[in-house]
Image (tube, grey):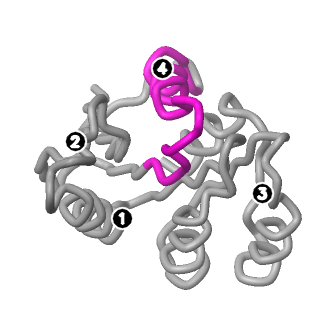
Amino acid sequence: MVRIVEAPEIYSNPYKTTLFLAGGITNCPDWQKELIDILTHTKYDGEFLQDLIIYNPRRKNFPIDIPGESERQITWEYDYLKSSDIISFWFSRGSLNPIVLYELGMWGNSSDTPIVIGMDPEYERKTDVIIQTKLARPAIRIVYSLVDMANEIAKAI
């Protein structure tokens, strides 16, 4: 069974594989929902994914006007990025994704955590991500669709 944990929910189960969905939110399409739908409704090697916890930082309603909520969100993301078994990075159209670039550098290209990287074909800074990833983690295959991303995640699990 796949369990979705949406920020700022607190959840811990050390017996299941955890996946963090790092990627654009502000001014970006809801790619997280689409990827979750693919991951939960597609069979991989004849089986649906089992025992997976997906940490989704995109909130249905983010209370931007409430003092402290931005810090709460950033802290939640930091804690769950740090504890995840796998981190996926999706670079979406609609934004330069500055936070995702930072997270890729911090968590993806400077640690041993398994990562999956995908980009919308229209993402403006593709070349930067490709070159930096090639230098830091040359074995990583970058994909250009959410379906391919889901397949790479399934392989990593």
Q: Secondary structure at mark 3?
A: loop
Query: Within the image, what quadrant is residue 115 found in?
Result: bottom right
Circle nearer the N terminus (1, 4): 4
User: How far is mark 1 from mark 4, CA to CA?
Assistant: 21 Å
Q: Name the disc covering residue 81, or none.
A: 1
Residue at x-position 56% and y-position 44%: 153
Residues at circles 3 and 4 in contact by the CB criterion of under 8 Å? no
> Is disc 1 in contact with disc 3, using a CB cutoff of under 8 Å?
no
Disc 2 or 1, which lies upstream in sequence?
2
Question: Disc 2 marks which amino acid?
Answer: Pro
Magenta span of residues: 21-44
Name the residue: 61% across, 78% down.
109
Where 19 sits versus 126, above or below?
above
| Mark 4 element type | helix
Callout 2: SS: loop
Q: Amino acid at mark 3?
A: Arg
CB within 8 Å, label 2 to label 1: no
Which mark lies nearer to you, 2 or 1?
2
